[in-house]
Image (tube, helix red, strand yellow):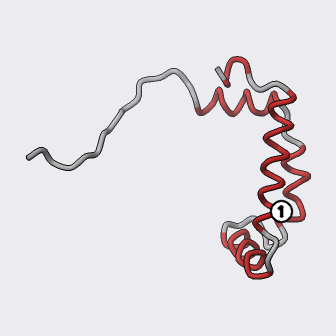
Amino acid sequence: KLANDGLTPEELARAKKKLIGQQEIANQSNDAFGYHCALDELYGLGFDFYKRLEHDVNAVTPEHIKLVAAKYFRDQPYVLATVRPPEK
């Protein structure tokens, strides 16, 4: 459905607001802020990634969502595995 219909502008705006808000809350303490900056640097995003995050998130359009969903959520054969303890 996401690949075919995409998101409404309202759904996308709500998701953007939630993501940005969660990041702001997660970085309220100095230790959490330092931790996230270090991880961003480790992941190759740069220690100052937090400065670009809001801009980058707000640049996403409903069309971007449809393109990514179509790429990764294709109708194709898949393997389903269930892990459980051995039967007694």
Label 1 amino acid? Answer: Glu
Q: Residue at x 83, y 62 (%)?
A: 24
Quarter residue 54 falls in: bottom right
Residue extending farthest to the left is 88
The N terminus lies in quadrant: top right
Name the element at disc 1: helix
Residue 70 vs residue 13: left or right? Answer: left
Quarter residue 44 falls in: bottom right
Residue 7 on image: x %, y % = 77, 26
Q: Residues within 10 Å of mark 1 (few under 14, many from 20)?
A: few
Q: How many labels, in total?
A: 1
Q: Nearer the viewer, residue 85 or 66?
A: 85
Q: In the image, is residue 61 above or below residue 74?
A: below
Residue 73 vs residue 2: left or right? Answer: left
Q: Residue at x 79, y 77 (%)?
A: 29
Residue identified by numbered label 1: 24
Quarter residue 45 falls in: bottom right
Q: In the image, is residue 87 above or below residue 11?
A: below
Residue 43 on image: x %, y % = 67, 66
Residue 50 on image: x %, y % = 84, 65
Residue 23 on image: x %, y % = 79, 60
Q: Nearer the viewer, residue 53 or 30?
A: 30
Q: Residue at x 15, y 48 (%)?
A: 86
